[in-house]
Image (cartoon, rainbow, N blue to C red):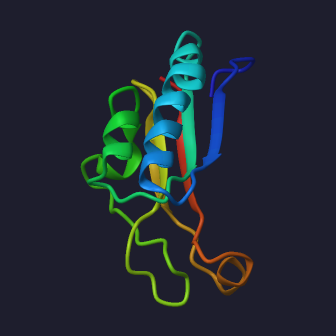
């Protein structure tokens, strides 16, 4: 990482209703992501409570790249922790951010802390 370079890190947790999540995605893009893209690099992480094929994912994906959609990256099932069946948790990055590795953090402590496994990535500035 370039010394002294600021990163724009955005963390979120969307609601459970379909319409609510779409509204949250639009507001997140307009009020947070687009302004942050003026000073990249940008990382968005969080629980979107939406599947990878959802409208919510598409709305955010118009501004940022889904880390787990990149070639050679595996999408991880993050919910529920007792038997992970679906991906609801994401990492998105701005153009040029290099993702060195990314995964879900699956440990007994993570499973005890939440009903979702957290995701993490090692990234490098463009």
- Placement of 47 over or under 122, stated as above or below: below
Task: Look at the image and tell me in which quarter the N terminus lies.
Answer: top right
**Which image quadrant for residue 53?**
bottom left
46 sits to left or right of 21 = right
Q: Which residue is painted at 57% across and 77% down in the image? A: 106
Q: Which residue is painted at 53% across and 60% down in the image? A: 16
User: Residue 51: percent from the left, percent from the top?
Assistant: 35, 59
**Which image quadrant for residue 85?**
bottom left
User: Residue 36: percent from the left, percent from the top?
Assistant: 59, 18
- Placement of 114 over or under 6, stated as above or below: below
Q: Residue 37 or 4: which is nearer the viewer?
A: 37
Q: Which residue is painted at 65% across and 33% down in the image? A: 9
Q: Which residue is painted at 51% across and 20% down in the image? A: 30
107 sits to left or right of 33 = right
Q: Residue 125 or 37: which is nearer the viewer?
A: 37
User: Residue 31: percent from the left, percent from the top?
Assistant: 59, 21
- Placement of 92 over or under 80, stated as above or below: above
Q: How many marks?
A: 0
- Placement of 106 over or under 88, stated as above or below: below
User: Residue 99: percent from the left, percent from the top?
Assistant: 44, 42
Which residue is the extreme one toward the top? Answer: 38
């Amino acid at each position: 990482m370039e010394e002294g370079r600021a990163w724009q890190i955005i963390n979120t947790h969307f609601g459970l209703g379909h319409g609510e999540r779409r509204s949250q995605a639009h507001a997140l893009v307009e009020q947070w992501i687009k302004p942050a893209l003026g000073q990249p690099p940008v990382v968005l992480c969080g629980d979107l409570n939406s599947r990878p094929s959802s409208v919510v994912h598409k709305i955010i994906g118009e501004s940022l790249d889904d880390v787990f959609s990149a070639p050679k990256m595996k999408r991880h099932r993050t919910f529920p922790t007792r038997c992970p069946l679906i991906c609801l948790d994401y990492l998105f990055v701005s153009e040029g951010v290099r993702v060195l590795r990314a995964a879900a953090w699956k440990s007994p402590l993570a499973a005890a802390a939440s009903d979702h496994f957290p995701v993490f990535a090692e990234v490098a500035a463009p």
